[in-house]
Image (cartoon, helix red, strand yellow):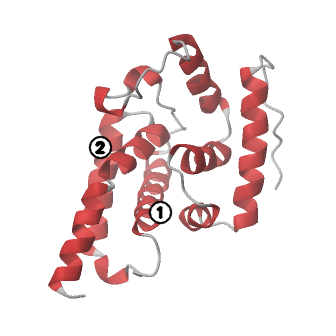
Amino acid sequence: MTGRATDSIAAEIVQNVASLRRFARALSGDPSLADDLVQDTVERALSKLHLYDPSRPLKAWLFAILRNLYVSEVRRVGRGRVVKTVDDMAPAEQAVDGGQESQLGIRSIASALGRLPEANREVILLVALEDMSYRDCAEILGVPVGTVMSRLSRGRVALRDLLEGRDKPSLRRVK
């Protein structure tokens, strides 16, 4: 890659830091771990720029790096999944209050997301929160597009069940 192309990609990486931080905090639930993940992601991306395929979206590549780093960390440390609460959000990441939802509603959504299986939660976060395409989401997670669609569908049903007061999501584990 030429110096100009590298500078352009580096600038685009910087533009994606906020999205990376949001996804890392949603995955880890720990603001300091999330910041470390984002820093490691940017460092890895910059050192491995020669592996980036410019025909693919850079954002998807960055999210895949971040997720792989997170999974490696969870395996290494043996930690269970922890979900970020709305109270942990930095002021810069909070949505503008439109008056439609109360704090209780937001907390119940965050709580319901935290009760979903990790595979379904990841897909919902990537598609709904980060506005990723199914193809990009599949690339990030390393699964077929059909699996993304299935996880998203089951996750939405389970999330709806939880928000409507049904204690247990209607998901089952299939091996």
According to the image, label 1 marks what residue?
A: 64
Q: Residues within 10 Å of mark 2 (few under 14, many from 20)?
A: some
Residue at image coords 38%, 25%: 88
Q: Is residue 71 above or below residue 112?
A: below
Q: Is residue 123 above or below residue 47?
A: above
Residue at image coords 39%, 48%: 19
Q: Position of residue 74 (x, y in %)?
A: 48, 48
Q: Label 1: state its secondary structure.
A: helix
Which amino acid type is marked by label 1?
A: Ala
Q: Is residue 120 above or below residue 139?
A: above
Which amino acid type is marked by label 2?
A: Asp
Residue at image coords 58%, 45%: 128
According to the image, label 2 marks what residue?
A: 35
Q: Label 2: state its secondary structure.
A: helix
Residue in the foreground of this view, choosing between 77 and 163? 163
Residue at image coords 75%, 29%: 160
Q: Residues within 10 Å of mark 1 (few under 14, many from 20)?
A: many
Mark 1 and mark 2 lie on one chain; the one further toward the N terminus is 2
- Quadrant of the snapshot with the N terminus: bottom left
Residue farthest to the bottom?
2
On screen, residue 85 versus residue 113, left or right, reads: left
Q: Position of residue 110 (x, y in %)?
A: 56, 26
Q: Position of residue 93 (x, y in %)?
A: 35, 33
- Quadrant of the snapshot with the C terminus: bottom right
Mark 2 and mark 1 in contact (Cβ < 8 Å)?
A: no
Q: Position of residue 166 (x, y in %)?
A: 81, 20
